[in-house]
């Protein structure tokens, strides 16, 4: 090892084995690091990349696949810190050349654009998000006359979910219908023709949906001539959070490294929480034997993140899991402070508790950004966001840039996407119907003409102006000619689009000023991207985070609290963590209706949430959190019970408190059955009724 590679000495022996595995040899064999939360998997992966670079690997030939773009840039920064120092290169040099770090979908989009011509794809393809995909599915459903309400054919969302499952799990439609969507099984034949037509429509329009980014990548790797070229671009492929990949992703990975050389994956089967997107823990369990010779396996058992009492509680929750590969972790971070189980009256008290504790911690020197509030579903943070705003506590919500879903922003984005790809029917449909007097019928005819002709924009110019559209029509045609031309400058063209859109905005909405402010925000975000296609791709694949005052990632020295769903909090850690609504009906989300597999996934979700905390963990149990239970007699609303994953027997591992401490809040919530006298029955008895 180079004399100054002291970073190796910071690692424990197992981590070091993983970092040094095969480095310096021509072809390191496949490596799997499988270990529990906070044991340093991501850290080991970063050290491995740094160690490879220090030992002469070309960072431009390293492919690093992470679960979010945020995780990728965090990893690049770590690599920079470790390797940059040893190599004595200027700051940013390593990060800048580690260009292939991103998510499977993001990397797929880039590789497909670069190799599009070789696989008969037009590189100007646009990417549909889930909503666009559902809209297209709907258009196709109509064309095939499958959507009549009377026939009770599955909704567009269900159709898309089935399609996506088939693609991602690499399973046969009949199999997916049988195991996941049994109530749709009677429609198998119609669904098959719907999906065939959907695929055809996407191809005609040159659009790819999320799943296509993986599917086409996999398809590209199945072509021997091109597969060699693509996999030959990389010497190393490393994947974090491998437990949350699906079949399609693992087949892409194997195709990128058919003999396993230079491939490293790390993960934890106890943290697998994405099976609703067809992720399968089998990927990580089958990895060792996917190659010959088989992969080397390294396991880590020491947790460096959490204090011992937090870890003990998390271990207890996961210990009850039915199937598990990774072992219990240990930590030598002693502490007197047990994790807190905080019972509060309702959601209002819950947000008061959280805000007060966060401010207290800040008084005590814990920055806001060292604290996080986690929740099951994005919508659960609503009351908290209001309270934080009221108290002037700045926050950032991961992936929460809601305004991208607003109609006027979608309108503007559709204009850009249509200009990028004039065959994109969903975008065109949206834009055309902004014009006065244009409905689905006329829009459909214009789009038909554009779809069939050799030059769609020319077809648009040639189309007869619809009677009532007036000047807006001429303006639109001019705009499309201009934006689809070569000489457009990003992001100035967004200004052109906005100018054309302004009268439509004013005619459609009353709160024009608020909406204009959003558009200004969009322009600020747009300025951060080098080109229109980069802007559209990244906004679709990984939208920026939302801060309490404006969008975009706050600069590093700003202080802000983190709000995140548990799913998006994967891989991260904070000094203090609050988890909202740790009650049955929320975690687990479904009251007993789910299968045992689903229930196990909910348990792992709680485990992921708890293991994000380093020093302080607060689990909140609002007693008046209404949960709905579906019964044969309709929905029933119940008061929440504490989550079944923390049964009474586990209470000694926690500090069990009521908040606010003085008011006895339980008395008024006693269910009627606990009453000693049932006066109601007595009254009824007076009239001879039971
Ligand atoms: P998760 O399963 O949540 O993704 P992980 O296994 O990837 O966790 P890391 O995030 O890499 O764990 O590490 C957890 C914490 O432990 C980090 O703060 C990291 O800096 C620290 N850590 C890891 N290895 C060591 C070590 N050898 N010495 C000191 N600290 C370490
Ligand atoms: Mg990690």
Image: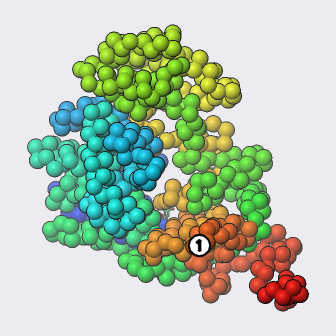
Q: Nearer the viewer, residue 276 or 60?
A: 276
Secondary structure category for the residue under label 1: strand
Q: Is residue 560 left or right of residue 607?
A: right
Colour scheme shown: rainbow
Vertical side of 3 occupied by 156: above or below: above
Point 38% across, 66% down: residue: 182
Quick check: is the Cβ at mark 1 less than 8 Å away from ligand 1? no
Percent of width and height locating residue 550: 63, 36
Residue at point 31% right, 47% down?
194
Q: Is residue 636 left or right of residue 318?
A: right
Give the residue number, with chain letter if any, for mark 1: 631
Q: Residues within 10 Å of mark 1 (few under 14, many from 20)?
A: few
Q: Give the residue at the far front of this rendering.
A: 688
Residue 542 position by quadrant:
top left
Q: Do we see residue 99 in this rendering?
A: no
Question: In the picture, which quadrant includes the C terminus?
Answer: bottom right
Query: Which residue lies at the image location 52% right of the left edge and 41% below the top edge?
Result: 544
Q: Position of residue 83 (x, y in %)?
A: 38, 50
Q: Is residue 579 visible?
A: yes
Question: Vertically, is 562 above or below 19?
Answer: above
Q: Is residue 109 left or right of residue 90?
A: left
């Amino acid at each position: 090892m180079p004399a100054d590679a002291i970073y190796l000495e910071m690692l424990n022996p197992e981590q070091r084995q993983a970092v040094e595995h095969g480095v310096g040899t021509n072809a390191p064999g496949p490596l799997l690091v499988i270990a529990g939360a906070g044991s340093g998997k991501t850290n080991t992966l970063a050290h491995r990349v740094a160690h490879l670079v220090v030992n002469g690997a070309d960072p431009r030939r390293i492919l690093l696949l992470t679960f979010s773009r945020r995780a990728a840039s965090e990893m690049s920064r770590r690599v920079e810190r470790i390797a940059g120092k040893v190599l004595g290169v200027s700051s940013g040099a390593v990060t800048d050349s580690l260009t292939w770090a991103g998510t499977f979908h993001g990397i797929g989009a880039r590789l497909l654009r670069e190799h599009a011509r070789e696989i008969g794809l037009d590189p100007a393809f646009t990417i549909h998000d889930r909503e666009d995909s559902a809209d297209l599915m709907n258009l196709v459903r109509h064309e095939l006359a499958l959507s009549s309400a009377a026939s009770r054919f599955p909704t567009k969302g269900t159709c898309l979910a089935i399609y996506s499952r088939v693609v991602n799990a690499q399973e046969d439609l009949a199999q997916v219908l049988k195991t996941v969507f049994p109530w749709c099984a009677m429609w198998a034949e119609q669904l098959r023709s719907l999906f065939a037509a959907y695929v055809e429509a996407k191809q005609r329009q040159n659009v790819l949906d999320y799943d296509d980014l993986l599917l086409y990548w996999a398809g590209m790797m199945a072509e021997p001539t091109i597969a060699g070229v693509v996999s030959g671009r990389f010497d190393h492929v490393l994947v974090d959070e491998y437990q949350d990949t699906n079949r399609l992703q693992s087949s892409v990975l194997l195709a990128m490294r058919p003999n396993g050389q230079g491939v490293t994956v790390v993960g934890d089967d106890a943290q697998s929480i994405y099976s609703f997107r067809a992720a399968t823990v089998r990927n990580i369990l089958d990895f060792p034997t996917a190659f010959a010779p088989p992969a080397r396996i390294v396991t880590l058992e020491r947790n460096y993140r959490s204090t011992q009492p937090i870890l003990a509680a998390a271990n207890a929750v996961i210990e009850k899991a039915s199937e598990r590969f990774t072992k219990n972790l240990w930590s030598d971070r002693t502490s007197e402070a047990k994790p807190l189980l905080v019972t509060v009256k309702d959601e209002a008290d819950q947000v008061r508790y959280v805000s007060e504790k966060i401010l207290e911690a800040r008084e005590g020197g814990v920055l806001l950004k060292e604290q996080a509030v986690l929740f099951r579903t994005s919508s659960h943070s609503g009351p908290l966001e209001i309270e934080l705003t009221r108290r002037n506590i700045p926050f950032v919500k991961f992936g929460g840039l809601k305004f991208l879903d607003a109609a006027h922003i979608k309108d503007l984005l559709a204009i850009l996407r249509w200009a990028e790809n004039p065959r994109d029917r969903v975008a065109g449909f949206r834009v055309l119907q902004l014009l006065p007097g244009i409905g689905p019928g006329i829009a459909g005819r214009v789009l038909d003409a554009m779809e069939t002709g050799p030059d769609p924009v020319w077809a648009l110019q040639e189309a007869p102006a619809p009677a009532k559209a007036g000047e807006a029509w001429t303006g639109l045609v001019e705009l499309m000619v201009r934006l689809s031309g070569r000489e457009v400058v990003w992001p100035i063209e967004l200004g052109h689009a906005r100018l054309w859109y302004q009268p439509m905005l004013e005619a459609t909405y009353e709160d024009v000023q608020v909406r204009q402010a959003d558009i200004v925000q969009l322009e600020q975000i747009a300025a951060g991207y080098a080109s229109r296609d980069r802007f559209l791709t990244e906004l679709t694949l990984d939208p920026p985070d939302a801060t309490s005052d404006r969008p975009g990632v706050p600069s590093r020295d700003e202080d802000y609290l983190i709000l995140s769903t548990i799913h998006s909090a994967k891989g991260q850690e904070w000094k203090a963590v609050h988890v909202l609504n740790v009650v049955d009906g929320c975690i687990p989300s479904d009251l007993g209706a789910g299968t045992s597999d689903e229930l196990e996934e909910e348990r792992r979700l709680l485990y992921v949430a708890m293991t994000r905390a380093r020093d302080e963990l607060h689990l909140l149990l609002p007693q008046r959190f209404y949960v709905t239970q579906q019964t044969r007699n309709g929905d029933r609303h119940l008061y929440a019970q504490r989550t079944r994953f923390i049964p009474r027997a586990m209470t000694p591992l926690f500090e069990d408190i009521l908040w606010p401490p003085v008011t006895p809040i339980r008395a008024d919530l006693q269910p009627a059955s606990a009453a000693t006298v049932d006066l109601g029955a007595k009254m009824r008895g007076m009239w001879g009724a039971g």
